[in-house]
Amino acid sequence: MELKERDLDRELETDMDWHHGTKPLVPRPETLSFFYNYNYNSPYPGVEVKQAALMETGEGSVPALMDSRNKEKKKRLTNNQIELLERSFQEEIKLDPERKMKLSRELGLQPRQIAVWFQNRRTRWKTKQLEHLYDVLKHQYDVVSNEKQKLQEEVMKLKAMLSKEQGFGKQTFGCYTEISGEETVESTSEGLTLRGKSNIEHVADQGYCSFTVEDYNTTVSLPPHCHWPAVPY
DNA sequence: GTTCTAACCTATTCATTGT
DNA sequence: ACAATGAATAGGTTAGAAC
C-alpha cells in the first residue's frame, strides 16, 4: 500500500516532468501543487477553463478522480480529443514530455491521461501488428503448403512413371530427376522457385507486409522486408 | 557496483457502450 | 444481461545518470 502511494507519487512527477531530468529531491513548491494532482481534485491550470467550457457544450471530459471518497466515473474521450491524439500518434508513436504538455493544454486533459492514452494506443497498435503478422505468416504457410502438396503429387506421378518403365525392363537415360532429396526437385508448377530468395521474402516483396510506421520494431522482430502497418486502430 | 529516477511495458480492473 | 471496448491502475523491467 505504501509502495503504491510512492509509485503513484512518482508517476505524478514523471508525467509532469517538472524537474527535467534532475533528481526531485527538493520539496515540491507550493505554487506548483496543481502539477501533482493529475487524478485528484486540483484542476490543471488553463485546463480548468477549457474543461468548464467543454462541459457546457456537453462534450467535456473531466479527469478521472479516483479518490475513494470523491470518486468520479470514468469518462470517454471526445471524438475531437481522440482525433487529435490519433494524429499525434501517427506522427510519432512515442510521447516526449514537451508534446505531452502541448497535447495536455490543447485537449484539456491531464498529462497523465495523455501518457495513458499513448500507452494504451501502443498496446492496441501492437496487438493489430501481431494480428497482421499472423495473417502474413498464415498466408505464407498456405502458399508453401499448397506447393508441398503439388510437389508430392508430382513425385507420385514420377514414381509411377518410373515403376512403369522399369516394368518394361528398360533403362531410361537423359531424363533423370533426383527425387530422393528435397533440394533438387524441379517443379513444373507455375512460378515455383524455392531456390535463392526464400518464400517469406517473396511474400514480403509481393506486398503482404504493407507496414508504414517505422522505427518501432524493437519489441517484435519481423522478416527483413516487413514494416508495421499504418497504425491500425 | 549500487542506487535512484524516468519511461516504458504487460496484465488487470472497472466503467461505459453497443447488442 | 452480456460482451466488447477503452481509460486507468498495479507492478515489473530497463536505461541512464549520479554517487
Image (cartoon, coloured by chain):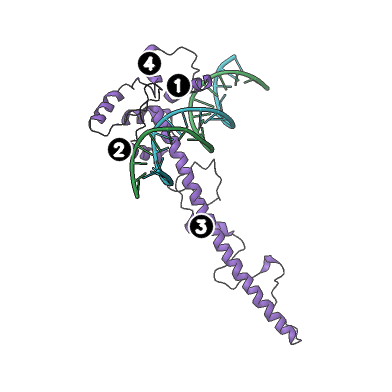
Chain colours: A purple, B green, C cyan
Q: Are marks 3 and 2 on the same chain?
A: yes
Q: Secondary structure at mark 3?
A: helix
Which quadrant: the C terminus of chain A?
top left
Chain assignment, label 3: A
Mark toward the start of the polypeptide (4 vs 2)? 4
Marks 1/2: CA–CA distance: 27 Å
**Image mark for residue A80:** 2
Q: Are marks 1 and 2 in contact (CB under 8 Å)?
A: no
Q: Secondary structure at mark 1?
A: helix
Kind of residue indicated by mark 2 = Asn
Q: Position of residue A24 (x, y in %)?
A: 48, 16
Marks 1/4: CA–CA distance: 11 Å
**Image mark for residue A205:** 3
Q: Position of residue B17 (x, y in %)?
A: 33, 41
- Asked if one can make out residue A153 in the rendered structure from this viewpoint, the answer is yes
Marks 3/2: CA–CA distance: 38 Å
Question: Label 1, on which residue?
Answer: A13
Q: Residues within 10 Å of mark 2 (few under 14, many from 20)?
A: few
Kind of residue indicated by mark 1 = Glu
Question: Label 4, on which residue?
Answer: A32
Q: Are marks 4 and 3 on the same chain?
A: yes
Which residue shows up at 48% across the image and 22% down it?
A10
Q: Quadrant of residue A148?
A: bottom right
Mark toward the start of the polypeptide (3 vs 2)? 2
Mark toward the start of the polypeptide (1 vs 3)? 1
Kind of residue indicated by mark 3 = Asp
Chain assignment, label 1: A
